[in-house]
Amino acid sequence: MTLETDLPLPIREGGTNNKYDFYKLTKSGYSMSYPAPDDLAVQRIRIAASRYGKRNSISFTTAIVTEDNERKIRVWRV
């Protein structure tokens, strides 16, 4: 076993276990879309955005949209 010093820490992008990657919405007006095949998926994403926003003092708004003939939920940072 050898002791090593002056090694840089690895850089993590975002937090751990971020299923929806809301941390990537860095500026107001940025948005991301997620597949929303049913109302339960929409509810889960909206709840996750709300909780993430409360923990980090960020506001989001959501809307159900159709993109490429697929139902999705779009999340905007406001």
Image (cartoon, rainbow, N blue to C red):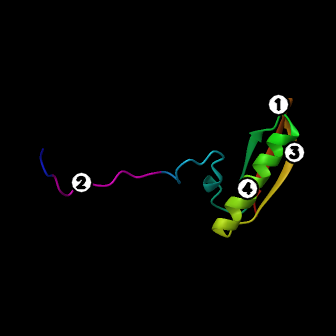
Whether residue 27 is in magenta: the answer is no
Give the alpha-carbon distance from disc 4 to disc 1, as whole Å.
23 Å
Viewer-proximal residue, 71 or 48? 48
Identify the magenta region.
Answer: 4-12
- Amino acid type at image mark 3: Ile
Q: Residue 27 at what x, y percent from top left?
A: 66, 62
In the picture provided, is 53 more to the left or to the right than 10? right
Give the alpha-carbon distance from disc 2 to disc 3, as whole Å.
46 Å
N-terminal-most mark, 1 or 2:
2
Q: Find disc 1 in the rendering and name its residue.
A: 68
> Are circles 2 and 4 on residues that touch, CB within 8 Å?
no
Give the alpha-carbon distance from disc 4 to disc 3, as whole Å.
14 Å
N-terminal-most mark, 2 or 4:
2
Q: Find disc 2 in the rendering and name its residue.
A: 7
> Which image quarter: residue 30?
bottom right
Give the alpha-carbon distance from disc 3 to disc 1, as whole Å.
13 Å
Q: Residue 19 at what x, y percent from top left?
A: 63, 45
Residue at position x 40%, y 52% in the image: 11
Viewer-nearest of discs 4 and 3: 4
